[in-house]
Amino acid sequence: MTILGKLDIGIKDRLKEKLESYLDESGDKSCVDDNHIDELVESLLSGRNIDFSGVTAIRGFIYQYYVAAKYLVDMLFDKRAWWNKVVFELLDDIALCSDKKIRFVQVKTKRESNVNNPLILSELHERKKGKGSWLDKLFLLNTYILNDEGTKLIRGDQTGDKYELEFEIATNSSYNDAIAVYERDDNYYSEVEEKEYEKLIKKMKEPSLNWKAKYKDKEFVFNKDFYEDETKGIKWYLEKFRVKRHGDIIALENSIINTITSHTAGTKSDYHKYQSKLILNKILIKVIERTCQDNENVEQKSFIFEKEEFQEMFKGFLAIVDTEAVEEAHSNNLHKMFTGYFDSIYKGFEAGNWNVFLKQELLTTMVEVRDYFLNKVSDYSDPYIYHRFLNRLFNLKNLDYHIPIDQIDDPGRIRDALKVLIYCLVFYKQKQYTPKNAELLLIRGIEESGEFKVFSAYNHRKKGNSDLAVKFVRASAMQCSASGDLNHDYYCLIADYTTRAKRGRREIKKQDSVNISVIELPTDMEGSDMEKAVSGLEITEVIESIKFLPLQEVQSYFDSLEGVEDIETFRTEEELDLWGEELDKLVNGWK
């Protein structure tokens, strides 16, 4: 039974309700269909890897849970962590508590994309449609309480006198100098002079605050008078306030995983990090389980994680994660999927009209490639190898999350890429596979003499014509340390680009694709964002080492060899020369 099956169905409904409410408030509801919402809820509750490449509107919602997990993990392992309780209010707010101090945290995110979208000062204080600003909610809702008669809100000075208070906006966004004034260290220390607060103080004092808010089912109005206090005015709040940037969601996830890895027994290998990621998933599930219960039945203690309790919980996660990591690595859907592709390729070779010698070399090469993937999973040296293959093939990125198969349109594209890469390697007795740090798929076939050829593959998924596909590859290659280390030509096989309009012979300009590149490319391009990034860029003559050719033409070349009886091996000097000539012919015919 999955973890999801063990959870109260009400938790699933409550989580979905919260996500839909988040999308309504952000104005992004129309960007996300119900199926994607259901998939995300299933992923969160089942502990599977979350696909960050999906709809970016949802990342802000997930980000809240990762901030919560970070403060829980830091409570155990960070020497600077003074809190022994993490308190959640349905995850709208987080409070870090000790016997002497309380820090109130609100998580505010901006859409993650390749376009610079920094947090600006007005977003902290802006009041719209009778609502309080981010700062109004952070400051006032956390420091005002009902009086004894329950008739009005008063400042909870007893809390403020007993505890040292801190306030934090936790964000994924970068920010400008006006925001940086409020970026304090973990001790809330800053050398910024008080006069730097004046701009924000002036805005907060404007009489626009007329905010109707509910407190324990009673409606009250917050106005600017709530900040008019000789000792605890706006300046008092701002002196105890900071903006904390935790990085984008992938950086935040990696930070938490690294903390767990550093404080648990292991070799700091990828497998150890894989275990840490499974522990993080369990923490996320536990937070969701505790904070998404039915409001009518939930007990207040459900929202409080005490240090000793969470420490025992963490030990329990640690005790079972090794077994689960092994099961996860071997029963992973991707592993099953790739096994199916390799089986299909094997059967195709076996049933093909190949002579017995060539068929055996094809089958042997296929098994070698399959076993390479399998061994990487089995010995835990790279549990994410299937994820990396997909992201390199379709996104030209070295990433360890799974691309949903329905985003690929036709899973046969994966099988075809594997098959053609096997074809490329069959000529060579020695093979070297993609370096772990590579953005591109890069495989190397080495001849007996030591000569070698390097091949790459990219599936464009009909996102544009061949020129755009070339730009995508070159953009990634310019950022890829592994391809940057290559000082010789290598071949990139491109599939599924749209057909360009035919041109007359006189219009065709002879131009070797070796001399085509792009300039001034932005970084961090991924998926559809890459198309926006390279659109309009000029092609310039900069010598590059990538030779482009159509993947389907390589497939056609091997189709022509099937049925040939007078070749006993792909690996003779003659066949290698013919193979090299065919590659060059396809490269020259690219344009």
Image (spheres, grey):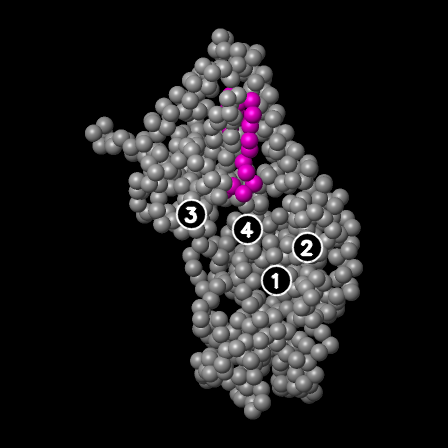
Mark 2 element type: helix
Q: Residues within 10 Å of mark 1 (few under 14, many from 20)?
A: many
* Dot label at residue 530: 3
The kind of residue on which mark 3 rests is: Met
Mark 3 or mark 1: whose residue is earlier in sequence: 1
* Residue drawn where x is 51% and y is 25% of the image: 450
| Region in magenta | 421-439
Mark 4 or mark 1: whose residue is earlier in sequence: 4
How much space separates mark 2 and mark 3, taking CA atoms?
34 Å
Q: Quadrant of the N terminus?
A: top right
Q: Which residue is mark 2?
A: 262
Q: Which is more toward the observer, 340 or 103?
A: 103
Q: Which residue is mark 4?
A: 52
Q: Residues within 10 Å of mark 2 (few under 14, many from 20)?
A: some
Q: Which is more toward the observer, 456 or 146?
A: 456
Residue 418 vertical placement versus 115 (above, below): above
Mark 3 element type: helix
Q: Which quadrant of the structure image shows residue 363?
A: top right
The kind of residue on which mark 2 rests is: Ser
Q: Which is more toward the observer, 152 or 59?
A: 59
